[in-house]
Image (tube, helix red, strand yellow):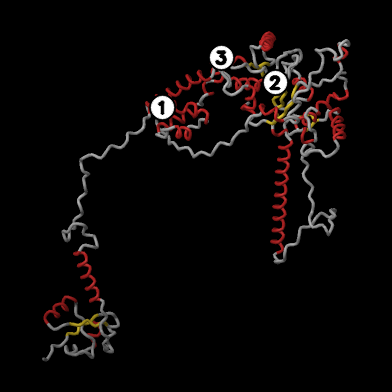
Amino acid sequence: MYSNDRPDIRLMSRPLALPANSFRDLAFLIPDGFREGDLPIPPFLVFFDNTKEAEKAVTYLRTRLPDSLSKKVLWFHSTMTQQYREEQVEAMRQGSVWGLCCTDAFGMGMDIANIETVVQWKATCDMCTLWQRFGRCARGARLRGTAILLVEKKDTAEERQTKALRAAKRKEKTAKVRVGTKRRASSALRGDGQPKRPALADRNLMIREDSPDLEIDAPDIGAAALPETRPLHALKEERRQLYADRTVVETKAKGREQEQAVDDYINAKHIGFACRRIVPTLYFNNDQKQNNSHLLCDTTAPDGCTRCIPPPPCGCCDLCKPDEFLAYHVPAAERPPKTSNKSNIKPYKMSTVDFDLKNALQEWRRRTALIKFNASTVRTLGVRILMSDNILARIVDCAHAGKLTSIEDLSKESGLTKDRINEYGDELVKLILVYHPLPAPPTAVTDNPTRKRAPPRCRACLNVGHNSSSRSCPKRAEARQNTTRNEDIENIPPATIASHSDSRLMPNQARHRESGPPPLASFAPLGPAPFIPAPLAHHLSTTTSTVHHIPTQLSYYYDYPRPPDPS
């Protein structure tokens, strides 16, 4: 048995930095701004376990190529005919195809010498399959390649440790809430106002009295969470035995089990391995196998067969020389800045201008999509790849309401991405203003003077500047003074006068009991004063002397004519 180690292949593993369904983590395969006439892209293979994902990845990679070079990247899976697959393999061998997004259909027997990069999309296979796929790389003489494993964040030790710590904090917080609720309930049931006693511990738990703090065991966060502190030799032998037993790691994904070797390959640094190549070496026992096949092939040469001689080691892995793998990273997704809220467009009935704008936007979208993408991509994905129908309808609604007058308004209201705004913002704003132009600026001040309103005129005093209900009107002030004077005269309380003993009787009763009326000149009559009706009292007041109104205890007013002055 001979070693299957490939020192001419550099090994790398990193988590996905961007959403998996965007496939933007494969952007390093095609440089930014690649144009026709640039140097050809080094051949590459991307392995998937799903045909749909392979086709979607090809669609994304083609967006990074000019339309004339879109056929340089193809998908390769078992649903295609054998003849088609043979033609594509031969085209890649000749250099007319630069990359394939393939499944297990590209496996044994597919020997292409010029492949420089192999990518495994997600950790969905075991170590044997992974190493076989990595072996498709750098099969030519003196050629070096790079094998990359892109994994989901949930497969990394950092993410597991973070989740475990969050779970421990939630558990501790829940325990505190439960203890506090139980104590409050017990205190409410007692109702004696006694201080709360400390919670009782488990009887089986022995606590030293001299220990001020109670140690709580840390949560189990997995074997790959923290680096091992044991000797490297003992760690290697333990891992070798685990790999020989084909130990698997249970995952939360339904129906999925990950091999321990693949998990250690991903998290080699966290289990104490300074090199990622140690894992496949222990898995395949390459350190215990011979690697002298080149000496047996040509015994006449001191260095053996020049064709079978192992290639010199290259950069090994991303743990040994991380600076050599910076080109295979992509920037993490930036959180978009917080934007202002969109305007609320009320329902309306579309006019002819709105329909014309909608048709113009649809025509612009179709024409621009054919320019930016190739015709085959547009036929496959439709013109919505450039602008969705919802965004187009939103633009029509906002233009109807007069909300789109600049690129800033378009970025705020439409929902287009920043790249689309930077690339097509000017065109869209110009197209919108053709159908919904800006309102005309306000006209200049004309020579005609503005008509002034006549000042108010009072109907009472005929003065200008106020009306008849205004307090500043002199007539209103004079009438108010007269009213106040009359009210003061009427409400003056008269002097208190001693009344007759029978003055409490009604006038009609008093008239029958008295033999005759009291003298007119008397101020203190013996009998009750005669009751004089109001008209007669008014007549007497005009013909005789002044009449005084003196109230009685029954609130009846009696008139006493004042005698004339003797002088």
Query: Mark 3: which secondary structure?
Result: helix
Image spot of residue 111 (x, y percent): 74, 13
Image spot of residue 397 (x, y percent): 43, 31
Q: Residue at horizontal 24%, vertical 80%?
A: 557
Q: Is residue 533 visible?
A: yes
Disc sitting over residue 68 in the figure: 3
Residue type of the residue flagged with mark 3? Ser
Image position of 510 (left or right of 439): left
Query: What residue is shown with label 1?
Result: 430
Q: Are there few (<14), some (14-19), or many (20+) residues within 10 Å of tag 1?
A: some
Query: Mark 2: which secondary structure?
Result: strand
**Could you say which quadrant of the image residue 133 lies in?**
top right
- Tell which circle, 1 or 2, labels the residue nearer the N-terminal end: 2
Query: What residue is shown with label 2?
Result: 117
Q: Quadrant of the C terminus?
A: bottom left
Residue type of the residue flagged with mark 2? Thr
Mark nearest the camera among 1 and 2 is 2
C-alpha span from label 3 to label 2 = 23 Å
Disc sitting over residue 335 in the figure: none
Residue type of the residue flagged with mark 1? Lys
Query: Mark 1: which secondary structure?
Result: helix
Q: Residue at horizontal 23%, vertical 91%?
A: 526
- Tell which circle, 1 or 3, labels the residue nearer the N-terminal end: 3
